[in-house]
Image: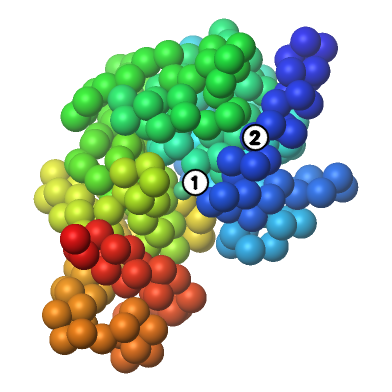
């Protein structure tokens, strides 16, 4: 345990710069408060606050799935929050954490792989492993905290009520976004392919694509039907209907951006003319970023 803690401290400093490029910095020293939400008897969520407030932002929504053989986490929040994650998991089960699924590469979803140690199985899409290997947090000695198991299109872990299905449908937020389904519980974790009701963040440095985003979500909706509850990347729990609306929103935003680009409009002008009012509860804080990503992607 002591060795793990020491490594955790050493790594935290190294991973901050990586995190800062994409997300707000890790919280300063102080009480680290994570809320826990019970979805089912054996499924909890360590909830996320909206990115932006560095003092309270712990990272994305973490699913805590309690199986016969141990606990599986989907994502593991920002570096420095590992103990707070562990404390919350211990408040609902005595079972050890045996597996972590990283939905994608970002530091607010992979920041505590090191904290939980090299004996834990770490699963991700093959492209996410490639993306993670470029991060300072996983260089040198720390490469041992990279995914130990990868897949290409679809895979399943465990069996019966403990089964977890992992799906890959193409680029979007990054090049390696995994959708995690708990079929016995009819719950889906989308990672940041549905992070919030706002413009999608398409991380082109990690193979993300706002052009592919709606198509990738469409494949998900067409293929994965057995779901009642959606755990998004960073917002409160959603329904399949919300997910369908988000797919429509990303498709509308893409075709709008393409039209505006053809008409010679600047990204600022295009953003000003985009109306989110017809979507329920949508914000416009990230619409410009998404339009710019489409422009960057389509220009030669
Ligand atoms: Zn992300």
List the single residue furthest toward the right.
Answer: 30
Is residue 35 in view?
A: no
Image coords of residue 272 (percent x, y) = 37, 89
Kindly identify which residue carries mark 2.
15
User: Mark 2 Cα within 10 Å, few/some/many (few <14, many 20+)?
Assistant: many
Q: What x and y, as percent, mark residue 175? A: 30, 41
Q: Residue at x 45, y 37 (%)?
A: 105
> Residue 86: x, y in percent?
69, 29
Q: Quadrant location of residue 10?
A: top right
Mark 1 Cβ inside 8 Å of ligand 1: no
From the image, tell me which residue sits under label 1: 39
Q: Is residue 155 above or below residue 43?
A: above
* Image-based side of 136 in relation to 292, left or right: right
Closest to the observer, 95 or 20: 20
Residue 154 locus on image (x, y percent): 21, 28
Looking at the rendering, which quadrant does residue 273 occupy?
Answer: bottom left
Q: Identify the element where label 1 is drawn.
A: strand
Query: Of label 2 and label 1, which has the lower sequence position?
Result: 2
Front one among 270 and 164: 270
Which residue is the extreme one toward the front?
300
Q: Does mark 2's beta carbon lie closer than 8 Å to ligand 1?
A: no
**Nearer to the camera, 106 or 71:** 106
Distance from disc 2 to disc 1, alpha carbons, whole Å, reads: 31 Å
Which of the image's four quarters has the N terminus?
top right
Q: Secondary structure at mark 2?
A: helix
Judge whether 20 appears above or below 168 on screen: below
Q: Quadrant of residue 258?
A: bottom left
- The disc at residue 277 is none
> Residue at left 27%, top 53%?
209
Q: Is residue 250 left or right of residue 102?
A: left
Q: Is residue 152 visible?
A: yes
The residue that appears at 76% across and 56% down in the rendered structure is 55
């Amino acid at each position: 345990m002591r060795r793990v803690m020491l490594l955790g401290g050493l790594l935290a400093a190294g991973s901050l710069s990586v995190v800062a490029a994409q997300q707000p910095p890790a919280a300063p020293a102080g009480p680290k408060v994570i809320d826990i939400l019970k979805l089912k008897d054996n499924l909890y969520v360590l909830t996320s606050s909206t990115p932006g407030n560095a003092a309270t932002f712990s990272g994305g929504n973490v699913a805590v799935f309690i199986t016969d053989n141990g606990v599986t986490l989907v994502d593991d929040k920002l570096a420095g929050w590992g103990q707070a994650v562990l404390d919350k998991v211990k408040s609902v089960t005595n079972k050890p954490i045996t597996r972590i699924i990283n939905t994608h590469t970002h530091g607010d979803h992979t920041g505590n792989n090191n904290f939980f140690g090299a004996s834990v199985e770490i699963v991700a899409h093959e492209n996410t492993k490639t993306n993670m290997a470029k991060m300072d947090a996983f260089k040198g000695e720390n490469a041992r905290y990279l995914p130990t198991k990868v897949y290409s299109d679809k895979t399943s872990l465990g069996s019966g009520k403990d089964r977890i299905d992992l799906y890959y449908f193409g680029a979007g937020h990054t090049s390696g976004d995994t959708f995690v389904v708990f079929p016995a519980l009819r719950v889906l974790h989308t990672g940041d392919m549905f992070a919030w009701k706002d413009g999608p963040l398409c991380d082109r440095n990690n193979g993300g694509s706002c052009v592919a985003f709606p198509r990738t979500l469409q494949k998900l909706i067409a293929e994965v039907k057995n779901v009642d509850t959606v755990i998004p990347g960073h917002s409160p729990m959603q329904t399949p209907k919300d997910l369908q609306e988000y797919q429509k929103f990303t498709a509308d935003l893409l075709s709008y951006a393409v039209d505006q680009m053809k008409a010679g409009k600047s990204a600022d002008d295009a953003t000003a003319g985009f109306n989110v009012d017809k979507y329920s509860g949508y914000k416009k804080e990230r619409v410009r970023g998404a339009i710019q990503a489409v422009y960057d992607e389509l220009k030669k």
